[in-house]
């Protein structure tokens, strides 16, 4: 469906043409004075220069042509030459009816569906998920869902960090703790046990221990580097251990992401490309791009127009070990071969921007991607605590994601049982659903690139611009619709009529924006635009709700019209929160 703005623009453009002016001056925008009008057109102002005429004269000519419009119920020329507009109630009702009858409430699927690989999540194997990884998961999941809603093919890849130093650290620490393990026996040729020699909790304790030691102890660090190297070179025992680490850790990660309503199509990682690294490096050398510099292999990626220094891309360290850059490049090659995507997008902390500048330039230079393949870095800001510093536990340690979710759910639970009699079990279940909305909405309502303050108190509030407020509104609408059904009402035969009050009209205007908002939010990869939209929509609904007797309305046609509008609003809210990656409970 065309957007309502397009339709109104068409109407005003025709009037410009009929009045003898350039029709392109007839473009309409939302009004910035909602007290005076709903839409406005500033074209007459621009026309003044072209036609050597006072803008108010042009505006008046145009308004005259709009007198019999079926689309507009008001068109007013105001000084110095603006045209103030209101859409006709009938026309709006008809537009909303059409939305109701369309599959995606007026959103059209892309004419040229694109294939995009979305690289998000990016957890590091064997390290507990912490809040730093939360934003990538939340933002990435939302972009994936938006893209799919618009008919694109979006393939989500978690891109595990499973091939770097942390693997060497864990192996080193395990070696110290359990030297008797068969994995460490030289020349061992037998089978390795199927069972991992550690549990997930052990694993999670081992990594920080090892990482701490390596920072204090040079020798320990050298051992870990050597173990990493050995692993990459194919040491059998280390590979077997690494597989265990991966398996135990991924099982746990899957559980954690499922709790967040986040899921991935691909569970690949840095290690997935281990076999293609050597041929890739060789090719880069053959192309004359990669050269040796102090033992390491590098590719120059700086460009003349650079204003800040872009260091060469290091492809192999002097000991031959692969780096973060190496695996990212090899992954691009692999993704192009397997999926031939139009775009690869990375949702990663914005502090990693330079890394991606280097990787993208190298990939383009070496022809790993096509001329027109888009490589996009969507860098997000830091999640800070109330003190404005990166979010920590009360004790000042790194906050684990599990604990953060636990804290939010606890807070939500308290609010839900407050002043209410509700079964403990139900309250817990609801707290989990609403808690997730608090976290996700709290994050997504900010522009992704900005830092934001994670404020549990504010995010869990039922009032204001929060996830719980949106859900509360959704549940309120659902309960009205349910009550109508319980009273024997039939929701199938409803039809939206022209608005009878200002608050009803205002709600209709908000509802009619849906297709435009979604298309634009995806174009800009800006979930926060969906958040602001549903906040406005929820506010418009609540104003209408407080001013209107819905189920008590005696005029049946009017009542049905209200309910039809409510159904549309509910469907919009649900589609939006689904794109944001959460859902509404049955009751709250
Ligand atoms: N594992 C990385 C980290 O924790 C993020 C990975 C991002 N994706 C990528 N293709 N480099 O910082």
Image (cartoon, rainbow, N blue to C red):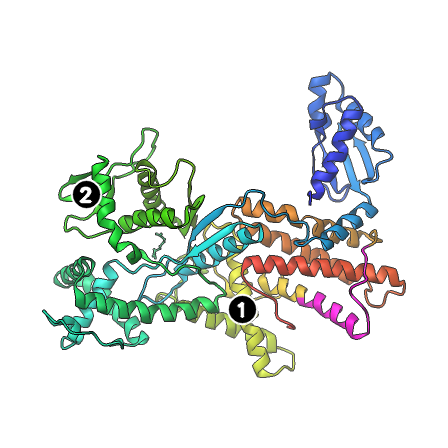
Q: Is residue 449 visible?
A: no
* Label 1 secondary element: helix
Q: Does the residue at mark 1 contact the one at mark 2 (Cβ under 8 Å)? A: no
Image x and y of residue 310, in percent? 29, 38
The magenta stretch is 475-496
206 to the left or right of 522: left
Image x and y of residue 150, in percent? 58, 50
Residue 422, by quadrant, is bottom right
State the residue at coordinates (29%, 34%).
Answer: 302
Task: Choose between 411 and 510: the one closer to the eye.
Answer: 510
State the residue at coordinates (56%, 57%).
Answer: 579
Of circles 1 and 2, the one toward us is: 2
State the residue at coordinates (39%, 48%).
Answer: 350
533 to the left or right of 174: right
Residue underneath mark 1: 435
Residue 315 sits above or below residue 467 on the image: above
| Image quadrant in which the N terminus is located | top right
Image x and y of residue 219, in percent? 12, 62
Residue 200 sits above or below residue 101 on the image: below
Q: Which mark is residue 297?
A: 2
| Image quadrant in which the C terminus is located | bottom right
Residue 357, by quadrant, is top left
Image x and y of residue 166, in percent? 25, 62
């Amino acid at each position: 469906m065309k957007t309502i703005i397009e339709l109104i623009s068409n109407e005003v453009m025709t009037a410009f043409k009929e009045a003898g002016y350039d029709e392109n001056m007839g473009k309409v925008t939302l009004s910035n004075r909602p007290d005076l009008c709903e839409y406005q057109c500033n074209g007459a102002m621009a026309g003044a220069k072209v036609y050597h005429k006072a803008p108010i004269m042009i505006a008046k000519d145009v308004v005259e042509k709009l007198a019999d419009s079926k689309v507009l119920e008001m068109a007013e020329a105001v000084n110095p030459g603006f045209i103030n507009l209101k859409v006709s109630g009938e026309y709006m009702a008809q537009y909303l009816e059409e939305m109701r009858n369309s599959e995606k409430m007026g959103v059209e699927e892309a004419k040229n569906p694109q294939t995009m690989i979305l690289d998000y999540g990016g957890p590091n194997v064997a390290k507990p998920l912490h809040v730093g990884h939360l934003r990538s998961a939340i933002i990435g999941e939302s972009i994936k869902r938006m893209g799919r809603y618009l008919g694109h093919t979006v393939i989500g890849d978690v891109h595990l960090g499973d091939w770097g130093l942390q693997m060497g650290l864990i192996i080193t620490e395990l070696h110290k703790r359990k030297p008797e393990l068969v994995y460490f026996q030289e020349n061992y040729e037998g089978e390795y046990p199927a069972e991992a020699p550690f549990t997930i909790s052990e694993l999670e304790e081992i990594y920080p221990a090892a990482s701490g030691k390596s920072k204090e102890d040079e020798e320990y660090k050298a051992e870990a580097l050597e173990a990493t190297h050995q692993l990459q070179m194919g040491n059998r025992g280390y590979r077997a251990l690494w597989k265990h680490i991966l398996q135990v850790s991924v099982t746990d990660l899957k559980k954690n992401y499922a709790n967040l309503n986040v899921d991935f199509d691909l569970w690949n990682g840095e290690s997935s490309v281990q076999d293609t690294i050597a041929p890739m490096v060789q090719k880069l050398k053959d192309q004359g791009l990669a050269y040796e510099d102090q033992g390491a292999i590098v590719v120059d990626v700086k460009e003349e127009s650079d204003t800040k220094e872009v260091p060469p891309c290091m492809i192999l360290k002097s000991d031959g070990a692969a780096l973060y850059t190496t695996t990212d490049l090899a992954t691009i090659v692999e993704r192009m071969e397997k999926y031939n995507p139009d775009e690869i997008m990375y949702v990663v902390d914005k502090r990693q921007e330079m890394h991606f500048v280097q990787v993208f330039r190298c990939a383009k230079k070496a022809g790993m991607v096509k001329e027109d393949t888009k490589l996009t870095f969507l860098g997000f800001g830091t999640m800070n605590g109330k003190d404005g510093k990166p979010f920590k536990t009360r004790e000042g340690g790194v906050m684990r994601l599990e604990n953060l979710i636990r804290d939010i759910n606890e807070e939500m639970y308290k609010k839900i049982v407050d002043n209410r009699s509700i079964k403990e079990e139900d309250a817990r279940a609801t707290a989990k659903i609403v808690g997730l909305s608090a976290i996700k909405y709290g994050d997504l309502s900010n522009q992704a690139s900005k830092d934001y303050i994670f404020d549990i108190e504010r995010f869990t509030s039922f009032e204001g611009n929060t996830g719980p407020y949106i859900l509360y509104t959704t549940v309120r609408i659902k309960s009205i619709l349910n009550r109508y059904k319980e009273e024997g009402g039939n929701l199938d035969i409803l039809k939206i009529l022209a608005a009878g009050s200002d608050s009803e009209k205002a709600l209709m205007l908000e509802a009619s924006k849906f297709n435009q908002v979604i298309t634009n939010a995806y174009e800009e990869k800006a979930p926060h635009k969906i958040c602001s939209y549903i906040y406005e929509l929820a506010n418009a609904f609540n104003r209408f709700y407080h001013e209107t007797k819905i189920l008590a309305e005696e005029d049946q046609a009017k009542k049905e019209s209200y309910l039809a509008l409510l159904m549309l609003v509910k469907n919009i809210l649900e589609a939006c929160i689904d794109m944001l990656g959460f859902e509404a409970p049955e009751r709250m």
